Image (tube, rainbow, N blue to C red):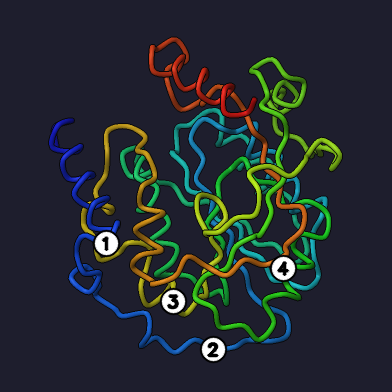
Amino acid sequence: MSGFGESVVSMFYRLAVSGALPVAWFRDVDPATVEKVKKTGKLKLEIVSHCWRYGHFLTYQLSSLVNHRTDKLDITMTVFHVPDDDRVVPVLDYFGRMEVPGVTWNWQPLAKEELFRRSIGRNRAAKNTTADWIWFTDADIIFHEDCLDTLADLLQGRDDGLVHPNIGLGTKLLPEDDEILEKGREGPNLLEIPIDQFTPYGGPRKKAKGPHQITHGDIARACGYCDSIKYYQTPAPRWMKTYEDRAFRWLIGTHGTPLEIPNVCQIRHIVKGRYNKNSFFTKVRKFIRKSQDQ
């Protein structure tokens, strides 16, 4: 698809999601008809992350599952990646050799063009998950102290289609030479960022979006992740903006229920590693991010 064609199709679906067209036209499964089991006890949680060139962030994320592991959940940590990504594969190899009680590592290789459309991997995970809940996240999210323990308690007996953390914590916007990022680049290791490096940002979250989408397993298996919209399951030549987050909420009919999940932490950074650092658009993005932070 040409760049112009891509833009037109993307705009069409963004317009549809805004309410211009009936959602029933785009659904294969009505989420209201899905029977959702209210599970209790030790729940199964699948965490799904995509990683392209962000091995230093992934190191911190996977470390958090070791440093702050929980006995209250059986966790499958799924990471979609490109097999020849030399920044990510060494991290996966390092943690893959580590045995962590209650954690199953699940590395899923994708062609680069499939990874670039994040909804492709998320959809495959959703349709195939055996978990009670599935958390769609990003590689720069850290599950700090008490995060997963509290989540396990909050999910007991719930049948919401979608939940999300009410408040997120983040670092300051880190420049490329920040000590935290440099430490992550030194190579795979078990790392930690002290909790006092994170502060609330963005205010209370009104919607489950980006890396904060925790979906009921029955909804995930029945509806997938934008499974019924072919465009969002089509490989792309470059990393695509994630407009499908909004489409996913539209298709399953909810913005999500906010829960008081503590210490969901994000490593916030100025320069996006998946873009050309010297391009005009990268410089514009950097300026906008710094301005928004101020």
Question: Residue at 65% across / 86% down in the picture?
Answer: 157
Q: CA distance from mark 4 to mark 3?
A: 18 Å
Q: Regarding mark 4 in the picture, which secondary structure is present there? A: helix
Task: Name the quarter where the C terminus is drawn.
Answer: top right
* Residue on which the image places disc 2: 37
| In the rendered image, the vertical position of residue 34 relative to residue 276, given as above or below | below
Going from N to C along the chain, the mark reached first, 3 or 1, is 1
User: Of the residues tagged 3 and 1, which is closer to the observer?
Assistant: 1
Q: Could you tell me the amino acid type at mark 3?
A: Ile
Q: CA distance from mark 2 to mark 4?
A: 17 Å
Going from N to C along the chain, the mark reached first, 4 or 3, is 4
Question: Residue at 57% across / 55% down in the picture?
Answer: 212
Going from N to C along the chain, the mark reached first, 2 or 4, is 2
* Residue on which the image places disc 4: 151
Q: Regarding mark 2 in the picture, which secondary structure is present there? A: loop
Q: Are marks 2 and 4 in contact (CB under 8 Å)?
A: no
Going from N to C along the chain, the mark reached first, 2 or 3, is 2
Crowd around label 4: few <14 · some 14–19 · many ≥20 (10 Å): some
Crowd around label 1: few <14 · some 14–19 · many ≥20 (10 Å): few
Q: Could you tell me the amino acid type at mark 2?
A: Val
Going from N to C along the chain, the mark reached first, 1 or 4, is 1
Q: CA distance from mark 3 to mark 1?
A: 22 Å
Q: Could you tell me the amino acid type at mark 1?
A: Gly
Going from N to C along the chain, the mark reached first, 2 or 1, is 1
Q: Regarding mark 3 in the picture, which secondary structure is present there? A: helix
Residue 19: which disc? 1
Question: Residue at 75% across / 56% down in the picture?
Answer: 99
| Quarter holding residue 1 | top left
For residue 163, side relative to residue 156 (left or right): left
For residue 122, side relative to residue 18 (left or right): right
